Image (cartoon, grey):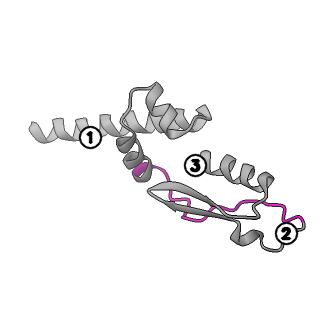
């Protein structure tokens, strides 16, 4: 009897997070903002996102315009691991930075 209730509890928890992840994907909100608006723990949200959503890999393709700057590849670095970090160096292109921010905030 107790095993059935644990299985039912796990299934209910899974459905809860599947529903929230589906709703978040459709919301166009950041993870943090969605969690605040729905009173969810962001760490739990990230755990269930990793568990339930397919892995999109650690690399994100970012379309950029190089313009006249040959040194651009070293101007903006994006580090993805746990949380996102964008490093900006001298000679960055503001339009490319805007594209990077838009793409990373959608993850």
Q: CA distance from mark 1 to mark 3?
A: 26 Å
**Badge 1 vs badge 2, beta-carbon distance below 8 Å:** no
Which residue is disc 1 drawn over? 10
* Residue farthest along the right direction in this orientation: 68
Q: Is residue 49 above or below residue 69?
A: above
The residue nearer to you, when weighing 5 against 103, is 103
Q: Is residue 77 above or below residue 4?
A: below
Q: Circle 3 sits on which residue?
A: 107
Residue 92 x/y as whole percent? 75, 61
Q: Secondary structure at mark 3?
A: loop
Closest to the observer, 22 or 96: 96
Magenta stretch encompasses residue 74: no
**Region in magenta:** 51-67
Name the residue: 43% across, 53% down.
Answer: 50
Choose mark 1 or mark 3, whichever is in front: 3
Which residue is drawn at the image coordinates 35% and 40% (left, top)?
14
The residue at which mark 2 appears reads as: 69
Viewer-closest of 73 and 20? 73
Nearest-to-viewer mark from 3 and 2: 2
Q: Is residue 56 left or right of residue 14?
A: right
């Amino acid at each position: 009897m107790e095993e059935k209730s644990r299985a039912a509890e796990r299934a209910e928890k899974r459905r809860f997070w599947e529903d929230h992840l589906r709703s978040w994907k459709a919301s166009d909100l950041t993870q943090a903002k969605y969690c605040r608006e729905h009173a969810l723990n962001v760490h739990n949200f990230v755990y269930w996102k990793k568990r339930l959503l397919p892995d999109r890999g650690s690399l994100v393709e970012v379309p950029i315009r190089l313009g006249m700057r040959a040194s651009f590849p070293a101007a903006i670095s994006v580090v993805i691991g746990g949380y996102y970090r964008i490093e900006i160096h001298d000679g960055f292109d503001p339009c490319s930075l805007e594209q990077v921010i838009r793409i990373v905030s959608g993850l």
